[in-house]
Image (cartoon, rainbow, N blue to C red):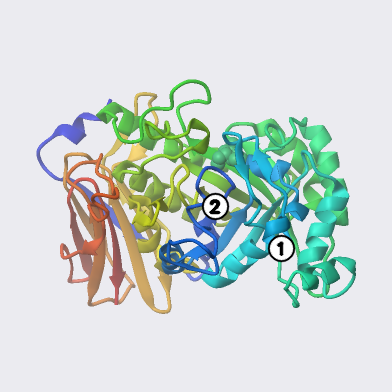
Amino acid sequence: MLSAALHGVSAERFTVTLEPSDSAPVIHPEIYGQFAEHLGSCIYGGIWVGEGSGIPNTKGYRNDVLQAFRDLKIPVLRWPGGCFADEYHWTDGIGPRENRPRMVNNNWGGTVEDNSFGTHEFFDLCELIGTEPYLSGNVGSGTVEELAKWVEYITAEDGPMAKKRKENGREKPWKLKYLGVGNESWGCGGHFTPEHYANEYRRYQTYCRNFGDNRLYRIASGASDYDWRWTDVLMKNAGRHMDGISLHYYTVKGWNGSKGSATEFDDDTYSWTLGKAVEIDSVITRHSAIMDKYDPARRVGLLVDEWGTWWDVEPGTIPGHLYQQNTMRDAMVAALSLNIFHNHTDRVRMANIAQIANVLQAMVLTRDAEMVLTPTYHVFRMYIPHQGARLIPLEVVGPDARDSKGRRYPLLGATASEKDGKVTVSLANTSLSEKAEVEIPLGSIKAAKVSGEILTSADIHDLNDFDAPDKVKPVPFKDARISKGTLTVKLPPISIVTLTLD
Ligand code: AHR
């Protein structure tokens, strides 16, 4: 049930107290990471169409999607899975495309792929959009030798793997920082016990070498949701051999049966969605506390390398392709989740929303030559100023809401940061019916001007589709003013705003 306050008539009032501090942490840009899996039309069709395609492309990558990704300033991109990673054999995806073997994507609908998008295509994509690559290595069905040689192929100046790479057209080694050793190794990545996986992790990471001046950041396959034991055993048995450990958390009803429609939901389901989404806060806190037992200095990062909403696929699409629509509800989940990651910068060093195109809570949806930007895309774009900015801790005083399970979630989501003398404040009014009036005393922050953008819609179900690609899009925001050292903001229901103070 939505709280009674949601159905009142007057605007809700909030005060946000900002507490700027030079010792506050800097928000890791990598929290704005993305994830691209060989799944449905994420890679094939969504990003890669091949050079011979009638869809306008640059070296096989769709031009519209490339531009959308560039505009998003994506700091890091995880590839090739996901569950796919543990069945992927990288040697199938190098060399002349016409000679590459075809493969069955067993995890995702049994689709046959031609391996035309492989290592070179991925690294070239990262260069084209200015993003750091994050490789997910095959532990489940691969070998130590296979993963070790992949690292050598990519990063060595010289030697047999470098020779092969050069023969395939890439003279200079690439840089590879982020290396995942398996994915969901407790499940699709091999159904390991944590004890067994910890041993395998130690073995694999030993042979993934630093060539030249390349330095790997080695990431162990971590827990999902509430699996505290996985984190505990891994940290105890292998913590000192890793730089990061992953965490997967989806806003999903459950793993069996219907997950609910992406587009048709009632107020209670909306409320449940936000309650479930913000529960990631306590999940991170608890995994982090377990990590503290073995790593009190917080050297090891917690990387939320899969997160987002997971609904039923769009009617008429292939169930194994996980193609779902994206409404203002998803935009709210994005905003509230990013706010939470900001508050955990001491442990959460990266997050990768699932996924970048045509899968789950996507940034872009494509249909043949058409593309739409989703409401979630717009949130990521509006939040760019927070990347690499110093967090401004804050407190919100005002009403909040509870979902049907009693989980508290904010009626006003808020986060703030400062970079290059500019303060950015992002606010989300999650109420379906009430305006929010927000007062923010600026204290020591010297600002005379405020400007901003708003993403809002009359109906939480609103979305962008190929017939109406711009139904939900940010527009300039006028309802903020600074007077006598206080910023006052009036937000309509269902709105997300980012303000810049000068
Ligand atoms: O993102 C879709 C899938 O969700 C990934 O392949 C897997 O890691 C997770 O279960």
Q: Residue at x 88, y 47 (%)?
A: 203
Q: Residue at x 88, y 51 (%)?
A: 145
Amino acid at dot 1 = Pro
Can the viewer see residue 161?
yes
Q: Residue at x 25, y 67 (%)?
A: 452
Can the viewer see residue 183?
no
Percent x, y for residue 62? 47, 63
Pointer 2 local density, CA inside 10 Å: few below 14, some 14–19, many at least 20 = many
Q: Secondary structure at mark 1?
A: loop
Nearest the eye: 367 or 299: 367
Q: Which mark is residue 500?
A: none
Nearest the eye: 211 or 468: 468
Q: Is residue 72 left or right of residue 82?
A: left
Above or below, comparing residue 372 to residue 56 in the picture = above
Residue most extreme to the left? 9
In this rendering, the label closer to the viewer, 1 or 2: 1
- Residue 149, located in which quarter of the rendered image? bottom right
Percent x, y for residue 10? 10, 42
Q: Are marks 1 and 2 in contact (CB under 8 Å)?
A: no
Nearest the eye: 380 or 169: 169
Q: Is residue 43 left or right of residue 271?
A: right
Which residue is the site of mark 1?
96
Amino acid at dot 2 = Ile
Above or below, comparing residue 263 to residue 126 in the picture = above
Which residue is the site of mark 2?
43
Above or below, comparing residue 393 to residue 315 in the picture = below
